[in-house]
Image (cartoon, rainbow, N blue to C red):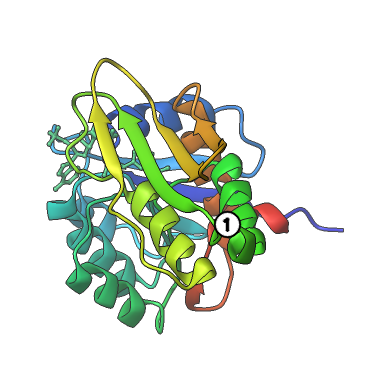
Amino acid sequence: MKAKAKAQIILVGSAGRVGQEITKHIESSAAAELYASIDHKGRGDFVAIDRVRPIKNAVVVDFSTTANFRESLAWAVKMKLPFISGTTGLSAKDFAALGTAAKTVPLIWSSNMSPGICLFLDFIENFGKRLAEYDLLIEEAHHKRKKDAPSGTAKTLQSVLVRSTKKKWPEPISIRGGGIFGVHKLWVMGEEETITFEHTALNRKVFARGAIAAAAWINKKKPGLYAMRDVFRS
Ligand SMILES: NC(=O)c1ccc[n+]([C@@H]2O[C@H](COP(=O)([O-])OP(=O)(O)OC[C@H]3O[C@@H](n4cnc5c(N)ncnc54)[C@H](OP(=O)(O)O)[C@@H]3O)[C@@H](O)[C@H]2O)c1
C-alpha cells in the first residue's frame, strides 16, 4: 500500500512556547514535516508562501494570539488548506468564523491537544448524571505569562460539565504562577467526602505531539469541524 504523503506544516506562532516545541518534535515525526515558520519576529510570512502555491499536503498549524488567530484562519481558507489551532482566549466572533470556515476547509480548534484531556472529557460525559449529585467546581493553574483566564481548557471542561449534568456550576477558579504547564482539576464535593480528578501536563511536548498528530490526521480530510477526540480515536 502506498504510504500517505507527509503533512507539510505551516506553523504560525513558531517563536512562541508551543511553536518552539512543535519545531523541536516535528523532526522525529514520520507523518509530518515543517514547511514554513511564521512569526512576528519575521522568519517568513503569508505573502511569501502565497507566491509558491500550490503547496501539496500543506496544513496551517496556529499557536499564536487571539489578535492573530483570525488572520491565520482567513489565510487557510483563502489557500484552501486544512487548519489546526490551539490558540485560546477566542471570542464568540472567532468561533463563528471557525464555523463558517469549516464549510470550505477541514479544521480542528482545540483548547487542549493532549490525549489525557480527551479522556477527562469522555469521563465527564459518561458520568454526568452521577456527578450531578455533588457540588462541582473546576480549578486550573498555569504559568504567570499566560494571557487568558480562565484557560481555554477550563472553559471546555465547564461547558461539557454543564451539558452532561444539565446544571449550572460556579465559574472555574484560575491560579497563575511560576512555570506551570497546565493543571486542570475537577472538584466533586459531597457533605462527607470529596473526590478530585486532576490532569497535569508534565511538559509542552504533549501539546506539540497532539498538534502534529492532528495535522497529519487532517491532511486530505473533507471540509468540516473535527475534534481532537476524532484524532485520538482513529
Ligand atoms: N491547545 C493547546 O493544547 C494549548 C497548549 C498551550 C498553549 N495554548 C495556547 O496557544 C497559544 C500560544 O501559546 P504560547 O504559550 O506558545 O504563547 P506565546 O509564547 O506567547 O507564543 C505566541 C507566539 O505567536 C506569535 N505571534 C503573535 N502575533 C503573530 C502574528 N501576527 N503572526 C505570527 N505570529 C504571531 C508571538 O510573537 P510575539 O511574541 O512577537 O508577539 C509568539 O511568538 C495561546 O493562546 C495559548 O493559550 C494552547
Which image quadrant is residue 108 in? bottom left
- Determine the residue positioned at 28% across, 41% down: 173
Please state, as top left, top right, bottom left or bottom right, where the C terminus lies in the image. Answer: bottom right
What is the secondary structure assignment of the residue under circle 1?
Answer: helix
- Residue 82 coordinates in the image, percent (x, y): 45, 65
- Determine the residue positioned at 61% across, 66% down: 129
Q: Is residue 230 visible?
A: no
* Front-most of residues 55 and 192: 192
Q: Residue furthest front?
A: 192
Q: Mark 1 highlights which residue? A: 131
- Residue 189 coordinates in the image, percent (x, y): 49, 43
Taking the image in four quarters, ligand 1 sits in the one at: top left
Please state, as top left, top right, bottom left or bottom right, where the N terminus lies in the image. Answer: bottom right
* Front-most of residues 98 and 60: 98
| Disc 1 residue lies near ligand 1 with CB under 8 A | no
* Front-most of residues 42 and 19: 19
Amino acid type, residue under disc 1 in the picture: Leu
- Residue 50 coordinates in the image, percent (x, y): 26, 60
- Residue 162 coordinates in the image, percent (x, y): 43, 66
Q: Residue furthest right?
A: 1
